[in-house]
Image (cartoon, rainbow, N blue to C red):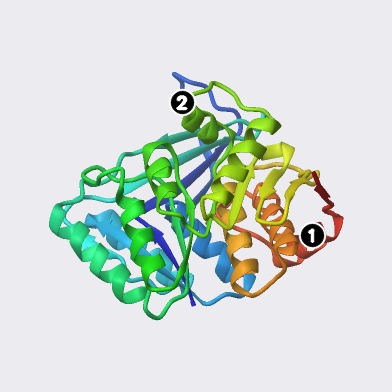
């Protein structure tokens, strides 16, 4: 069993239009609605990969009820903690003519102290029986930027392992708690380093620092350029396979899902790295968010070459 935690769950609504014109009437040709939020997207990819997965986090209001129903439709069990506020809707607009993607993201509910304490108690119970966790996404209002660090400390204490994928201070503080693996992108690392951009040397240097501090896998996603991985053995670079891109939203979550599936099932790290990149690439081939075709993942894995730096 693998548990994913989404503290700011959402309804992912995807509208496809022929050509988006701002300030005008746009007719929607296709609508996709699914349970979303980064951790839930990770769970969808894990399930499609063949893993037993459970979803945790917060959900509230009418939207929260809808999220639970959408998960049930996919046969993904959840133990989402019900909160007073209203869960958010994340709207993705796909312009089929020029391939551009526009996102409109609501902020979500404000979490109370009591609701947060319920979450920590739940994590304490879960991490005594579940050994793998994905902690993904932004923090909802009301939570301290140390929220992920608090969860990681509990998970580590109980001998479980967590993969963290967040940003800003939540990522910075979460890293201090030493999760098993992290998956920041270039922008997120640049923010941590106080730079506007980073190069390969920057990523290798900070990756080594993370690993020396106790993180087993520092995984840097580079979008269409692929990824860089740092572990205790060496540095590795992987070029992204060439695919026909439809929608890149959720590709980072698919990356985490592939990585977590591989590591949790005892794959060699380099194989898990290939799986991560293949899952992220396949997700980008579809309008759906957090979707993969396992046969396509396996085919892409055969095409991916890892270079030891």
SS at badge 2: loop
Q: Write the residue at 33% across / 61% down.
A: 57
Q: Write the residue at 74% across / 60% down.
A: 270
Which quarter of the picture shows residue 196?
top right
In the displayed structure image, the side of residue 10 where residue 265 appears, left or right? right
Q: Write the residue at 66% across / 74% down.
A: 266
Q: Position of residue 169 (x, y in %)?
A: 37, 38
In the foreground, 222 or 99: 222
- Mark 2, residue position: 25
Relative to 150, residue 189 above or below: above
In the displayed structure image, the side of residue 218 where residue 294 appears, left or right? right
Q: Is residue 29 visible?
A: yes
Q: Nearer the viewer, mark 2 or mark 1?
A: 1
Mark pair 2, 1: CA separation? 42 Å
Relative to 108, residue 161 above or below: below
Q: Write the residue at 53% across / 22% down.
A: 195
Crowding around mark 2 (Cα neighbors within 10 Å: few <14, some 14 to 19, many 20+) is few
Q: Which mark is on residue 301?
A: 1
Crowding around mark 1 (Cα neighbors within 10 Å: few <14, some 14 to 19, many 20+) is many
Relative to 53, residue 270 above or below: above
């Amino acid at each position: 069993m693998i548990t994913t935690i989404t503290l700011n769950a959402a309804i992912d609504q995807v509208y496809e239009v022929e050509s988006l014109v701002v300030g005008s009437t746009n007719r929607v040709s296709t609508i996709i609605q699914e349970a979303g939020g980064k951790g839930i997207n990770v769970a969808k990819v894990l399930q499609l990969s063949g893993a037993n997965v459970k979803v945790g986090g917060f959900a509230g209001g009418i939207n929260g009820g809808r999220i639970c129903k959408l998960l049930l439709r996919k046969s993904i069990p959840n133990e989402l903690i019900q909160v007073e506020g209203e869960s958010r809707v994340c709207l993705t607009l796909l312009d089929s003519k020029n391939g551009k993607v526009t996102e409109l993201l609501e902020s979500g509910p404000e979490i109370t102290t009591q609701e947060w304490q319920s979450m920590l108690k739940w994590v304490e119970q879960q991490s005594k029986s579940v050994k793998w966790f994905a902690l993904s996404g932004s923090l909802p209002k009301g939570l301290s930027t140390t929220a992920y660090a608090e969860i990681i400390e509990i998970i580590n204490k109980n001998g479980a392992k967590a993969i963290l994928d967040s940003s800003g201070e939540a990522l910075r503080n979460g890293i201090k708690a030493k999760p098993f693996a992290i998956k920041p992108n270039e922008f997120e690392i640049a923010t941590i380093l106080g730079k506007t951009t980073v190069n390969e040397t920057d990523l290798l240097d900070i990756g080594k620092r993370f690993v020396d501090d106790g993180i087993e896998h520092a995984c840097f996603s580079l979008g269409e350029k692929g990824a860089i991985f740092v572990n205790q053995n060496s540095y590795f670079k992987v070029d992204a396979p060439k695919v026909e891109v439809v929608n890149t939203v959720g590709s980072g979550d698919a990356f985490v899902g592939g990585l977590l599936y591989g590591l949790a099932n005892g794959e060699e790290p380099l194989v898990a790295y290939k799986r991560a990149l293949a899952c992220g690439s396949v997700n980008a081939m579809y309008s759906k968010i957090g979707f993969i075709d396992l046969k396509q993942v396996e085919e892409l894995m055969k095409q991916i070459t890892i270079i030891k730096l």
